[in-house]
Structures are given as structure tokens and as C-alpha cells.
Image (cartoon, rainbow, N blue to C red):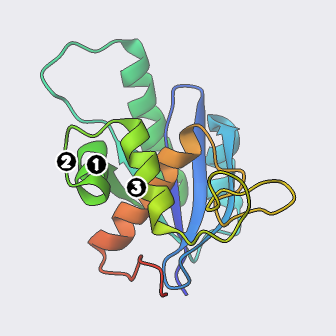
Amino acid sequence: MKTIIGIDPGTHQSAWIEYTPEAHQIGDFGIEDNKTLVDQLAWGNWRDHDLAIEMIASYGMPVGQEVFETCVWIGRFIEAFCGGEFVYRKDVKLHLCQSPRAKDANVRRAIIDLFPATGGGKIPQVGTKKHPGPLYGVSTHVWAALGVALTYAASQQINSQPTI
């Protein structure tokens, strides 16, 4: 089974997640300092994985220094891994929500709806500490990294839907 590393890059830290489409399961995930993530990509045990990284797109508005610094880190991640594929946020929104106007909350809800409700609590796909669901522990920018991985899997025509 091919595993995808999805990355939501940032200026100083980036979120990452391991996703195996054939099993529709997430593995490890986290938010790391960018230098640490570069080292993981270069020397870690991810050599047999695919790398999908969110790429910044221009929509005609002025951008600041942070956007350019994030672009540099994206390049360093691709170089450290010796390859990878760009996934644009617009494509994540279209794939998961069928709308380029979707907000982060809509994307998060669409991701949650793709996973089985096997945990406890108000959102059983996430679950609770006592009864965790398949998305237990996923938070903040890791949701975006998972959206990147799911969208990449779909673009590669890898089965990214749960089998019920």
C-alpha cells in the first residue's frame, strides 16, 4: 500500500500527515519546525511514500514576506524528498466541497464526513480520549495537510473513499 505524506507548509512550522488511501487510514501526523521536517523528509523512513504539498497560488493580490518565505520552504521540502507533487488549496476545496468558495470549516466537515463514526463523543469520527475515532488528535493545520493528501489521492485515482 502506498502512503502519502501531506504537508500544509508554513513560514516557521508545517503540518504533516501520513495517509494510506487503500486502507483509508491516517498514520502519524504532527506540526514540526520546518528544519526538522526537512531532515525527516531527507533522512526519515518515508522514501517509499508519495509527497503531496500545498502550493501557494497567486490571485492577483499583493503578498508579504511570509508568503515568499513559505515558498522557499516548499522548495526545500521538495528538494529534501527528491520530488513531490503540488496540490493547490483551490483544488482541495473543489475536491472536498465542490466549491472554490469553501472555508476551512467546510473543508474540515467534509473530511470528517469521509471517515467512519467509530469513536465516542459529539463527533465520533474524531472521538474522545477514552473512545477515539479514526481522526482522534487531528487539529489545526493537520486538517489542511489531510485535505492535501486526500485530494492528491483522488487526483492519482487511488481509492480514497471508505469501504462500508
User: What residue do we see at 31% from left, 44% from top?
Assistant: 89
Q: Earlier in the sequence, mark 2 or mark 3?
A: 2
User: What residue do we see at 64% from left, 59% from top?
Assistant: 135
Marks 3/1: CA–CA distance? 9 Å
Q: Residue furthest front?
A: 122
- Indicate the position of residue 63 as horizontal and vertical percent values: 28, 15
Q: Amino acid at mark 3?
A: Ala
The mark lying in front, picked from 3 and 1, is: 3
| Snapshot quadrant of residue 139 | top right
Please say if 142 is above or below 59.
below
Q: Earlier in the sequence, mark 1 or mark 2?
A: 1
Label 2: state its secondary structure: loop
- Indicate the position of residue 111 as horizontal and vertical percent values: 45, 57
Q: Amino acid at mark 2?
A: Ser
Marks 1/2: CA–CA distance? 6 Å
Q: Which residue carries the number 1 mark?
A: 93
Label 1: state its secondary structure: helix
Q: Which residue carries the number 2 mark?
A: 99
Disc 2 crowd, CA 10 A, few/some/many (<14, 14-19, 20+): some
Query: Mark 1 near mark 2, Cβ–Cβ under 8 Å?
Result: yes
Label 3: state its secondary structure: helix
Marks 2/3: CA–CA distance? 12 Å
Q: Amino acid at mark 1?
A: Lys
The answer to whether residue 9 shows anywhere in this view is yes
User: What residue do we see at 74% from left, 61% from top?
Assistant: 120
Q: Which residue carries the number 3 mark?
A: 110
- Indicate the position of residue 79 as horizontal and vertical percent values: 47, 51
